[in-house]
Amino acid sequence: ETGVTQSPTHLIKTRGQQVTLRCSSQSGHNTVSWYQQALGQGPQFIFQYYREEENGRGNFPPRFSGLQFPNYSSELNVNALELDDSALYLCASSSLAGGYTGELFFGEGSRLTVL
Amino acid sequence: GENVEQHPSTLSVQEGDSAVIKCTYSDSASNYFPWYKQELGKRPQLIIDIRSNVGEKKDQRIAVTLNKTAKHFSLHITETQPEDSAVYFCAAASNSNSGYALNFGKGTSLLVTP
Protein backbone atom coordinates (compact mmCIF):
# COMPACT_ATOMS: atom_id res chain seq x y z
CA GLU A 1 0.00 0.00 0.00
CA THR A 2 1.19 3.54 -0.78
CA GLY A 3 -0.10 5.07 2.47
CA VAL A 4 -2.07 7.88 0.82
CA THR A 5 -5.65 7.79 2.02
CA GLN A 6 -8.59 9.81 0.76
CA SER A 7 -12.10 10.39 2.01
CA PRO A 8 -14.86 10.08 1.16
CA THR A 9 -14.51 7.44 -1.54
CA HIS A 10 -17.77 8.33 -3.23
CA LEU A 11 -20.18 11.22 -2.90
CA ILE A 12 -23.11 12.78 -4.71
CA LYS A 13 -23.83 16.51 -4.71
CA THR A 14 -26.16 18.81 -6.57
CA ARG A 15 -25.27 21.84 -8.65
CA GLY A 16 -24.37 24.90 -6.59
CA GLN A 17 -23.38 22.94 -3.52
CA GLN A 18 -19.94 22.90 -1.94
CA VAL A 19 -17.73 19.87 -1.29
CA THR A 20 -14.64 19.15 0.80
CA LEU A 21 -12.37 16.22 0.00
CA ARG A 22 -9.66 15.04 2.36
CA CYS A 23 -6.26 13.44 1.94
CA SER A 24 -3.67 12.03 4.31
CA SER A 25 -0.23 11.91 2.77
CA GLN A 26 2.23 9.08 3.02
CA SER A 27 4.49 9.18 6.04
CA GLY A 28 7.62 11.26 5.35
CA HIS A 29 6.10 13.17 2.45
CA ASN A 30 5.82 16.95 2.66
CA THR A 31 4.06 17.78 -0.61
CA VAL A 32 0.51 17.11 -1.68
CA SER A 33 -0.91 17.52 -5.18
CA TRP A 34 -4.50 17.25 -6.34
CA TYR A 35 -5.61 16.01 -9.73
CA GLN A 36 -9.00 15.80 -11.45
CA GLN A 37 -9.60 12.76 -13.65
CA ALA A 38 -12.69 12.87 -15.84
CA LEU A 39 -13.99 9.58 -17.19
CA GLY A 40 -11.74 8.23 -19.93
CA GLN A 41 -9.18 11.01 -19.53
CA GLY A 42 -5.79 11.44 -17.96
CA PRO A 43 -5.49 13.22 -14.60
CA GLN A 44 -5.31 17.01 -14.78
CA PHE A 45 -3.25 19.01 -12.27
CA ILE A 46 -5.30 21.24 -9.97
CA PHE A 47 -2.69 22.48 -7.49
CA GLN A 48 0.15 21.49 -5.21
CA TYR A 49 0.79 22.32 -1.55
CA TYR A 50 4.16 22.49 0.17
CA ARG A 51 4.71 23.70 3.73
CA GLU A 52 1.05 24.66 3.98
CA GLU A 53 1.19 27.00 0.97
CA GLU A 54 0.00 26.63 -2.60
CA ASN A 55 3.08 25.85 -4.63
CA GLY A 56 1.77 25.64 -8.18
CA ARG A 57 -1.66 25.69 -9.80
CA GLY A 58 -3.17 24.33 -12.96
CA ASN A 59 -5.89 25.82 -15.14
CA PHE A 60 -8.71 25.63 -12.61
CA PRO A 61 -10.95 28.51 -11.44
CA PRO A 62 -10.69 30.04 -7.95
CA ARG A 63 -13.71 28.08 -6.73
CA PHE A 64 -11.23 25.20 -6.45
CA SER A 65 -9.23 25.87 -3.30
CA GLY A 66 -7.18 23.88 -0.88
CA LEU A 67 -5.40 23.66 2.41
CA GLN A 68 -2.42 21.79 3.78
CA PHE A 69 -2.12 21.20 7.51
CA PRO A 70 1.02 20.97 9.69
CA ASN A 71 0.84 17.17 9.53
CA TYR A 72 0.94 17.48 5.71
CA SER A 73 -2.62 16.27 5.25
CA SER A 74 -4.70 18.29 2.83
CA GLU A 75 -8.20 19.32 1.80
CA LEU A 76 -9.64 20.18 -1.59
CA ASN A 77 -12.68 22.46 -1.54
CA VAL A 78 -14.90 23.10 -4.51
CA ASN A 79 -17.58 25.78 -4.32
CA ALA A 80 -20.58 26.34 -6.57
CA LEU A 81 -20.42 22.84 -8.03
CA GLU A 82 -21.08 22.40 -11.74
CA LEU A 83 -22.07 19.26 -13.62
CA ASP A 84 -18.60 19.18 -15.27
CA ASP A 85 -17.01 18.86 -11.85
CA SER A 86 -18.13 15.23 -11.81
CA ALA A 87 -14.86 13.27 -11.80
CA LEU A 88 -12.41 11.22 -9.78
CA TYR A 89 -10.33 13.51 -7.58
CA LEU A 90 -6.90 12.10 -6.89
CA CYS A 91 -4.53 13.18 -4.18
CA ALA A 92 -0.85 12.44 -4.55
CA SER A 93 1.91 12.90 -2.04
CA SER A 94 5.62 13.24 -2.61
CA SER A 95 8.75 14.55 -0.99
CA LEU A 96 10.14 17.87 -2.20
CA ALA A 97 13.76 18.31 -1.22
CA GLY A 98 16.62 20.19 -2.76
CA GLY A 99 14.43 21.43 -5.58
CA TYR A 100 13.55 17.97 -6.81
CA THR A 101 10.32 16.15 -6.23
CA GLY A 102 10.36 12.41 -5.90
CA GLU A 103 7.84 9.89 -7.12
CA LEU A 104 4.17 10.77 -6.75
CA PHE A 105 2.12 8.27 -4.77
CA PHE A 106 -1.59 8.45 -5.53
CA GLY A 107 -4.51 7.70 -3.27
CA GLU A 108 -7.51 5.70 -4.48
CA GLY A 109 -9.43 8.88 -5.15
CA SER A 110 -12.78 10.42 -4.30
CA ARG A 111 -15.42 9.95 -6.96
CA LEU A 112 -17.67 13.00 -7.08
CA THR A 113 -20.97 13.00 -8.94
CA VAL A 114 -22.75 16.31 -9.43
CA LEU A 115 -26.43 16.09 -10.33
CA GLY B 1 2.05 25.16 -21.08
CA GLU B 2 3.06 21.57 -21.60
CA ASN B 3 1.05 19.44 -24.01
CA VAL B 4 1.47 15.66 -23.96
CA GLU B 5 0.13 13.55 -26.82
CA GLN B 6 -0.17 9.78 -26.39
CA HIS B 7 -0.71 7.07 -29.02
CA PRO B 8 -2.39 4.73 -29.58
CA SER B 9 -5.53 5.23 -27.52
CA THR B 10 -6.24 1.49 -27.59
CA LEU B 11 -3.89 -1.42 -28.14
CA SER B 12 -4.69 -5.12 -28.31
CA VAL B 13 -1.90 -7.72 -28.33
CA GLN B 14 -1.60 -11.46 -27.92
CA GLU B 15 -0.04 -12.78 -24.75
CA GLY B 16 3.72 -13.00 -25.20
CA ASP B 17 3.89 -10.23 -27.79
CA SER B 18 5.41 -6.81 -27.19
CA ALA B 19 3.48 -3.59 -26.70
CA VAL B 20 4.75 -0.10 -27.48
CA ILE B 21 3.12 3.15 -26.42
CA LYS B 22 4.45 6.49 -27.64
CA CYS B 23 4.20 10.00 -26.26
CA THR B 24 5.33 13.40 -27.43
CA TYR B 25 5.67 16.56 -25.39
CA SER B 26 5.98 20.23 -26.23
CA ASP B 27 7.87 21.93 -23.38
CA SER B 28 11.63 21.61 -23.80
CA ALA B 29 12.02 22.38 -20.07
CA SER B 30 10.35 19.07 -19.15
CA ASN B 31 12.90 16.77 -17.56
CA TYR B 32 10.92 14.06 -15.79
CA PHE B 33 8.85 11.45 -17.62
CA PRO B 34 6.92 8.87 -15.56
CA TRP B 35 4.59 6.15 -16.77
CA TYR B 36 1.58 5.11 -14.73
CA LYS B 37 -0.61 2.02 -14.91
CA GLN B 38 -4.23 2.34 -13.85
CA GLU B 39 -6.47 -0.67 -13.48
CA LEU B 40 -10.22 -0.19 -13.53
CA GLY B 41 -11.38 1.60 -10.40
CA LYS B 42 -7.87 1.76 -8.97
CA ARG B 43 -5.27 4.44 -8.37
CA PRO B 44 -2.58 5.23 -10.94
CA GLN B 45 0.61 3.40 -10.01
CA LEU B 46 4.07 4.34 -11.18
CA ILE B 47 5.65 1.55 -13.23
CA ILE B 48 8.77 3.28 -14.50
CA ASP B 49 10.16 6.77 -14.88
CA ILE B 50 13.06 8.42 -16.63
CA ARG B 51 14.84 11.70 -16.19
CA SER B 52 16.26 13.76 -19.01
CA ASN B 53 19.88 12.90 -18.30
CA VAL B 54 19.41 9.33 -19.56
CA GLY B 55 18.12 7.94 -22.84
CA GLU B 56 16.86 4.54 -21.74
CA LYS B 57 15.84 2.73 -18.58
CA LYS B 58 14.80 -0.88 -18.11
CA ASP B 59 13.10 -2.78 -15.33
CA GLN B 60 12.54 -6.46 -16.12
CA ARG B 61 9.90 -6.58 -18.91
CA ILE B 62 9.39 -2.82 -19.00
CA ALA B 63 11.61 -0.25 -20.66
CA VAL B 64 11.32 3.43 -21.45
CA THR B 65 13.26 5.37 -24.07
CA LEU B 66 13.61 9.13 -24.30
CA ASN B 67 14.60 11.28 -27.24
CA LYS B 68 14.94 14.84 -25.95
CA THR B 69 15.81 16.26 -29.34
CA ALA B 70 12.62 14.96 -30.89
CA LYS B 71 10.66 15.45 -27.65
CA HIS B 72 9.26 11.96 -27.55
CA PHE B 73 9.41 9.01 -25.20
CA SER B 74 8.09 5.49 -25.40
CA LEU B 75 7.08 2.61 -23.15
CA HIS B 76 7.99 -0.90 -24.21
CA ILE B 77 6.48 -3.96 -22.56
CA THR B 78 7.89 -7.31 -23.62
CA GLU B 79 6.42 -10.79 -23.09
CA THR B 80 3.04 -9.32 -22.26
CA GLN B 81 0.76 -11.11 -19.83
CA PRO B 82 -3.02 -10.79 -19.30
CA GLU B 83 -2.37 -8.98 -16.03
CA ASP B 84 -0.67 -6.21 -18.02
CA SER B 85 -4.14 -5.25 -19.27
CA ALA B 86 -4.88 -1.75 -17.96
CA VAL B 87 -4.82 1.90 -18.97
CA TYR B 88 -1.32 3.33 -19.25
CA PHE B 89 -0.60 7.04 -18.92
CA CYS B 90 2.55 8.89 -19.83
CA ALA B 91 3.36 12.21 -18.22
CA ALA B 92 5.90 14.97 -18.47
CA ALA B 93 7.01 17.50 -15.89
CA SER B 94 9.68 20.08 -15.24
CA ASN B 95 11.21 20.03 -11.80
CA SER B 96 11.85 23.26 -9.99
CA ASN B 97 11.91 24.75 -6.52
CA SER B 98 8.34 25.93 -7.05
CA GLY B 99 7.14 22.40 -7.35
CA TYR B 100 5.92 20.72 -10.49
CA ALA B 101 2.82 19.48 -12.18
CA LEU B 102 2.59 16.21 -14.05
CA ASN B 103 1.03 16.77 -17.46
CA PHE B 104 -0.62 13.50 -18.47
CA GLY B 105 -1.44 12.06 -21.84
CA LYS B 106 -4.97 10.81 -22.45
CA GLY B 107 -4.06 7.21 -21.84
CA THR B 108 -3.71 3.95 -23.75
CA SER B 109 -6.05 1.09 -23.00
CA LEU B 110 -3.97 -2.08 -23.36
CA LEU B 111 -5.68 -5.44 -23.71
CA VAL B 112 -3.59 -8.59 -23.60
CA THR B 113 -5.52 -11.61 -24.80
CA PRO B 114 -4.49 -15.15 -23.80
Image (cartoon, rainbow, N blue to C red):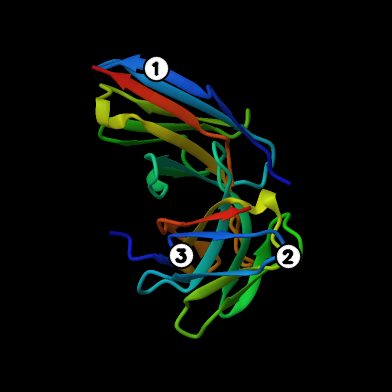
Residue B53 placement (x, y as % from top left): 50, 44
Label 3 to label 2, Cα distance in Å? 27 Å
Which residue is denoted by mark 1 in the rendering? B12
Q: Is residue B80 left or right of residue B101?
A: left
Q: Are marks 1 and 3 on the same chain?
A: no
Which residue is denoted by mark 2 in the rendering? A80
Label 1 to label 3, Cα distance in Å? 33 Å
Q: Is residue A91 above or below residue A71?
A: above
Q: Are marks 1 and 2 on the same chain?
A: no
Residue B94 seen by the camera: no
- Residue A95 or A113: which is nearer the viewer? A113
The crowd level at tag 2 (other Cα within 10 Å; few <14, some 14-19, many 20+) is: few
Residue B93 placement (x, y as % from top left): 59, 49
Mark count: 3
Discs 1/2, front: 2
Q: Are marks 3 and 2 on the same chain?
A: yes
Q: What quarter of the picture does the C terminus of chain B occupy?
A: top left
Which residue is denoted by mark 3 in the rendering? A93
Residue A97 placement (x, y as % from top left): 49, 70
Q: Is residue B99 above or below residue B38?
A: below
Circle 1: element type: strand
Circle 3: element type: strand
- Residue A96 or B109: which is nearer the viewer? B109
- Residue B16 or B55: which is nearer the viewer? B16
> Residue type at mark 1?
Ser
Host chain of mark 2: A
Q: Is residue A73 above or below residue B12?
A: below
> Residue type at mark 2?
Ala
Q: Residue at x 43, y 44 (%)?
A: B49
The crowd level at tag 1 (other Cα within 10 Å; few <14, some 14-19, many 20+) is: few
Circle 2: element type: loop
